[in-house]
Image: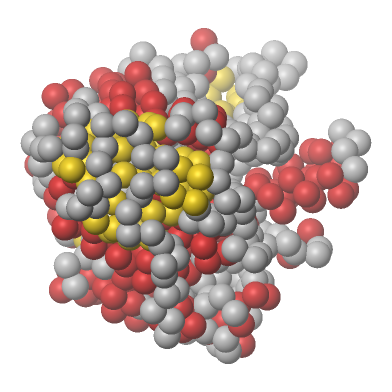
Amino acid sequence: MDKKWWHSSTVYQIYPRSFNDSDGDGIGDIPGIIQKLDYLGELGIDVIWLSPVYKSPNDDNGYDISDYYGIMDEFGTMEDMDELIMEAKTRNIRIIMDLVINHTSDEHPWFIESLKSKENPYRDFYIWRDGESGPPSDIRSVFSGPAWEYDEQTDQYYFHLFSKKQPDLNLHNERVRAEIHKMMDFWLEKGISGFRMDVIDLIGKEVDQGVLTDGTMLHPYLKELNDKVLSKYDVMTVGETPSATTDTAKLYTAPERKELDMVFTFEHMSLDEVEGQGKWALKQLELKDLKSFLSKWQTELHGRGWNSLYWNNHDQPRIVSRWGDDDEYRVESAKMLATLLHMMQGTPYIYQGEEIGMTNIRFDDLEDYRDIETLNIYQEKTEQGTPHDEIMESIFTKGRDNARTPIQWDDSKHAGFTTGEPWIKVNPNYRVINVSNALNNKKSIFYHYKKLIQLRKEHEIIVYGNFELIEADHEEIFAYVRRLDGESLLVVANFNEGTPKFTLPAGFSAIDAELVISNYDDSAESPDALKLRPYEAVVYLLKDCR
């Protein structure tokens, strides 16, 4: 496998609305990001993934784009965007942007034209169908309700897999694809370094056959996109592919296929939901399941594709609340989860606030929530007769606003995020959990992440070594080995508050072992016969005796 710059990089996702507000309107903005670039430089990240900042009426927090060539007024101007790209570059930080091409806003000029008549040249930019006494099919929207919206003027339905204000583009129309290629060139010429591609596995959909993901034209369209745009630049791409398996991930990411560089798998993100009932049907995570899934992705893509490594993003709850302990062992469990992930092969993604151990939020009033998915599911579940407390417990655990409360910069009013009223309330624990406290404590979660980022740059075994799961059936310990050129990296993590013992497997020697990183000050210098403390994680470099 040819070595690429993004193999050893670490990506930091910024959700602009909640990152840093520079002008006191309660909404994070691009100048606010520029103000914090030195902080990101201190952390050591290489790439910023910038969630959408394009012009948008904001029905789905920027994922409903009305102008791909403009910047949302709340976030700033194109001049601000140019400055961000330039200022990031001076700190050796690259920018990748969200590419949202499955749908637009219903306020995009293309859709406004499409609405005018069946003969309008933009009509076929979207998916329109006749319906006899109702929607053309029973496909449901991800955000609840039918995926079809009736237009009285033209007596047809348009398709929207998400909000009705997010009509799906018809990528089978060559003119649509040409416009997308043109737009991508515009941003790449500005100096960005790639794209995170939103729900990219949907762009080959065939609604008349009921096929949404992995349509027959999906991969040809991605190859075309690579050939006509991406191949001209030294960039990285990551596709959001909720439907991906390890087999399809190889199709997306095998270098010789020339499609994408990596994808986001959702398999591990579904392990704490009741199978077949969706994210709101909660169940306890089984560690053996997590080990099995992550191990599968590590081994099956090794040498044949590339992994993206993540616990958090703008759509997922905070990992320390989800699978750690956000109370007594918040620091230890946050560091353990970070260690476990960052020692794997792939490109790690850190979501804003993860590096200081930010936690989920439990708003008392439904009115305090802002996410369209959350508000819709509450209404739907209420109509189905689900008790209020049961719905709220699911929202507390899985709601997307868990990730969207403002970054907690310090212990001043509104956590230093804004001098105005924040668009969504700040988590009240900001007086304890904030960036200022983290920077002033060399034992903080922040400095643990900083060291993990640096280790990836220093040790090729982390970047390119193979992966072997050990203790596969242990119910408390997640342990694995990485190997490269006669060297081994042993990672042992206690996934709960117990004190399990770990014995070094046959074929390894603890002689001359080097403790690389741990989340306790006095972790054992040797991995021989470890007795782990709550959420303890240790990493050793060993000589491979096999």
Can residue 501 be seen in the rendering of this structure? yes
Q: Which of 406 and 435 is in front in this view?
A: 435
Residue extending furthest top? 209
Q: In which quarter of the image is the N terminus?
A: top left
Q: Which of 310 and 449 is in front in this view?
A: 449
Residue 530 lies, in percent from the top left, at: 44, 49
Q: Is residue 423 left or right of residue 482?
A: right
Residue 17 lies, in percent from the top left, at: 50, 66
> What's the image's color scheme?
secondary structure
Using the image, determine if residue 22 lies above or below residue 317.
below
Using the image, determine if residue 309 lies above or below residue 10.
above
Q: In this view, does 475 lie to the left or right of 6?
A: right
Using the image, determine if residue 132 lies above or below residue 390.
above
Residue 51 lies, in percent from the top left, at: 41, 56
Q: In this view, does 529 lie to the left or right of 17?
A: left
Q: In which quarter of the image is the C terminus?
A: top left
Residue at image position (32%, 67%) is: 450
Q: In this view, does 157 lie to the left or right of 248?
A: right
Residue at image position (79%, 38%) is: 380
Residue at image position (52%, 28%) is: 473
> Which quadrant holds residue 31?
bottom left
> Which quadrant holds residue 40?
bottom left
Number of disc labels: 0
Q: Nearer the viewer, residue 140 or 134?
A: 140
Can residue 81 be seen in the rendering of this structure? no
Residue 509 lies, in percent from the top left, at: 25, 41
Residue at image position (84%, 44%) is: 390
